[in-house]
């Protein structure tokens, strides 16, 4: 048994495997497959100030080794979340990270203020990047000043670990990372979905009712890995890496690129037990290479050979 | 829990339709109208995640450990599935969703095209319970009703309709419904699955004639278990429902027919 514990600043996790926002609901459904306490943490679907109905269907299209979604942040609102979802999630023994979204800076602040009053939340993850909702999301995530404003507004309301989740739909990811760290982010998570589109060549119609959507899954992994690596070079805060993780090798690659922890998103749809299975697989990976702990992988890309080569 | 089942049979049966029979313990517990979310690729092969998502298929029949599916090859996933061979393993997630609520009323089962799939299992259950029921199946051509013989095991009241009149009567399934309903002594409950235009037409008839009608809907699905909200449909009362977990079967009155285009 290798030591899988990771510390992202003051956020201590039993292992570096979490699940990505929006792919795991509030954990209720997947709790039928395995105890959620086996994960490092559960990151919830985005919670907004008011209930949201989301975008019209169809909201999903499969693409080459990926999916495009335009769910549009459908969620029951922060008050419902606090009353009906947080209790069971806490009872499951999982570390709870709440993903938040808003249409305005004030909305982000109001959601954060409400969540700050509830005990049992390990961290907030600020979604500044959802490409699905016309009124919000995209502007915050693509402009360093707006990203800072949102980060500061949430920082003012929330004393615990603050994660800011970056959008990949920018030219210089490192600039955004530096901006949000300067504004008070303790941890950076990335990547959110890449904005994409699909068209039906027979009907000439866009395949999503919302026309554009967010691309996720193995198709985006190389982009995600590159961005995690660039952000790791640019800032010194811990990173939660995600984007197309399906195997333990993928997990290892993200850790090597500089992530302290990863999130499984679209992979849950392929295999509902994937995230839990990857905890055990990571342990096996480390043991088979005589690595005592997972820390030995973090940020080690290109740094010397792997230890087992030295004895050959 | 996802289960690794074994393929017993996977054969073309005419008109782009295939029958897949698997050995599965988990599916022994299913009820009519529920579905399985399955991986078309072999669990043994190297995975390229293309296609990435599972494919939802209604449970066509369950006989002990033998569960069967009726599917139409329409795209990449179903074509890959059609290449799978007996003896190979298959990754099944199910039974999922909420099926038909069987009531004591006599029943009219309506299947349009591949919408016939959940009706065989329903016919089996109604037959086992000794209930009075009629099956109405429709398709474009007779070739696309090659599976209709499977219903003979459970029902002697089978009506077939084709668009071109090549088998059974000529027309649309919905044309025959009022007439068939009139033949029942006690008003029947209608159970339907098929394309959206057929279902919304039935919903119109049901509203007009005061029929009880359950419909099984389709939607693009990712998780299949209720977590991702990809499959949401809009309800009359202004709320939303997940086709995979709250459905796929809904009482017709619950659905906001105008807002569905999935
Ligand atoms: C609850 C449920 C039960 C189903 N039961 C059956 C069944 O018993 N037998 C059967 O043959 N099919 C059934 N379907 C439809 C089946 O899931 C799709 O035909 C299949 O996923 C298509 O996969 P593909 O890769 O072959 O096609 P794709 O390449 O994904 O698509 C090819 C074409 O099929 C259409 N299509 C794809 N997915 C769906 C879908 N979910 N619903 C409607 N059209 C779709 C696409 O718009 C496209 O035109 C069911 C769907 C649901 C939601
Ligand atoms: C269906 C779906 C819903 C999502 N909803 C959210 C969300 O509410 N908030 C958020 O920050 N990210 C959301 N995401 C993005 C994921 O959390 C993740 O960043 C992205 O999908 C990349 O990881 P993956 O390739 O492993 O899925 C969603 C992704 C998907 C596929
Ligand atoms: S497919 Fe994920 S909620 Fe229905």
Image (tube, rainbow, N blue to C red):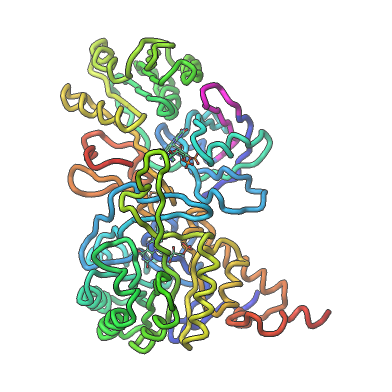
Q: Residue furthest right?
A: A312
Q: Residue at x 53, y 41 (%)?
A: B77
Q: Is residue B84 left or right of residue A75?
A: right
Give the residue at x 57% y 53%: B49
Q: Is residue B17 above or below residue A124?
A: above
Res A27 seen here: no
Residue in view at x 33 percent, y 15 percent: B171
Quadrant in the picture for residue A287:
bottom right
Q: Residue B16 in magenta?
A: yes
- On whether residue B31 falls in the magenta region, the answer is no
Quadrant of the image where one finds ligand 2: bottom left
Above or below for A219 versus A164: above
Res. A212 in view: yes
Residue B148 screen position, x and y as percent: 47, 17
Tell which of B249 and A309 is nearer to you: A309
- Find residue B76 and report its horizontal and vertical position in percent: 53, 41
Observer-nearest residue: B210 or A57? A57
**Which of the image's four quarters has the C terminus of chain A?**
bottom right
Q: Left or right? Give the position of B211 relative to A178.
A: left
Q: Which residues are magenta?
A: B11-25
| The N terminus of chain A, quarter of image | bottom right
Report x, y in % for residue B246. 33, 45
| Above or below for A13 versus B111 | below
Seen from the viewer's position, the closer of residues B168 and B91 is B168
**Residue B116 to residue A10: above or below:** above
Q: Nearer the viewer, residue A106 or B208?
A: A106
Q: Main secondary structure of the magenta part?
A: strand
Taking the spot 39% from the left edge, 81% from the top edge, the residue there is A176
- Residue A41 placement (x, y as % from top left): 45, 71
Q: How many marks?
A: 0
């Amino acid at each position: 048994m290798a030591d899988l514990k990771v510390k992202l600043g003051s956020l201590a996790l039993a292992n570096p495997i979490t699940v990505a926002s929006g792919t795991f609901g509030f954990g209720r459904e997947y709790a039928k497959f395995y105890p959620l306490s086996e994960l490092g943490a559960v990151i919830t679907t985005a919670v907004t100030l008011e209930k949201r109905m989301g975008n019209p269907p169809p909201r999903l299209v499969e693409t080459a080794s990926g999916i495009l979604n335009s769910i549009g942040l459908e969620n029951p609102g922060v008050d419902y979340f606090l009353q009906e979802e947080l209790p069971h999630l806490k009872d499951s023994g999982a570390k709870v990270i709440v993903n938040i979204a808003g249409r305005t800076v004030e909305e982000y602040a109001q959601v954060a203020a409400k969540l700050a009053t509830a005990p049992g939340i390990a961290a907030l993850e600020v979604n500044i990047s959802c490409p699905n909702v016309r009124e919000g999301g995209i502007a915050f995530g693509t402009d360093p000043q707006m990203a800072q404003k949102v980060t500061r507004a949430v920082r003012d309301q929330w004393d615990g670990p603050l994660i800011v989740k970056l959008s990949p739909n920018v030219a210089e990811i490192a600039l955004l990372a530096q901006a949000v760290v300067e504004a008070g982010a303790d941890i950076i998570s990335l990547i959110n979905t890449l904005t994409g589109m699909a068209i039906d060549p027979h009907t000439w119609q866009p395949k999503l009712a919302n026309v554009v959507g967010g691309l996720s899954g193995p198709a985006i992994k190389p982009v995600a890995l590159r961005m995690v690596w660039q952000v790791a070079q640019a800032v010194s805060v811990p990173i939660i890496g995600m984007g197309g993780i399906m195997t333990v090798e993928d997990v290892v690659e993200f850790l090597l690129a500089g992530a302290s922890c990863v999130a499984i998103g679209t992979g849950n749809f392929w295999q509902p037990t994937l995230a839990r299975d990857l905890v055990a697989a990571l342990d096996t990976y480390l043991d088979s290479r005589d690595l005592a702990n997972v820390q030995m992988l973090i940020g080690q890309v290109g740094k010397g050979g792997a230890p087992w080569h030295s004895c050959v | 829990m996802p289960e690794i089942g074994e393929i017993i049979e996977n054969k073309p049966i005419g008109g782009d339709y295939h029958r897949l029979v698997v050995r599965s313990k988990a599916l022994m517990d299913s009820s009519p109208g529920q579905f399985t979310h399955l991986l078309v690729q072999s669990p043994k092969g190297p995975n390229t995640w293309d296609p990435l998502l599972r494919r939802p298929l209604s449970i066509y029949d369950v006989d002990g450990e033998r569960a069967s599916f009726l599917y139409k090859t329409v795209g990449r996933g179903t074509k890959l599935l059609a290449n799978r061979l007996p003896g190979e393993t298959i990754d099944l997630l199910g039974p999922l969703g909420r099926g038909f609520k069987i009531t004591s009323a006599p029943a009219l089962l309506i299947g349009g095209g591949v919408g016939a799939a959940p009706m065989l299992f329903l016919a089996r259950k109604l037959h086992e319970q000794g209930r009075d029921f009629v099956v109405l199946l429709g398709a474009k051509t007779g070739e696309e009703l090659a599976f209709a013989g499977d219903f003979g095991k459970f029902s002697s009241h089978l009506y077939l309709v084709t668009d071109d009149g090549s088998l059974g009567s000529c027309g649309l399934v919905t044309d025959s419904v009022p007439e068939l309903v009139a033949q029942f002594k006690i008003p029947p409950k209608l159970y339907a699955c098929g394309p959206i235009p057929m279902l919304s037409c039935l919903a119109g008839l049901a509203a007009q004639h005061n029929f009880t009608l359950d419909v099984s809907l389709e939607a693009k699905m990712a998780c299949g278990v209720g977590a991702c909200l990809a499959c949401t449909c809009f309800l009359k009362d202004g709320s939303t429902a997940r086709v995979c977990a709250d459905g796929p079967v809904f009482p017709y009155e619950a659905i906001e027919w105008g807002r569905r285009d999935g």
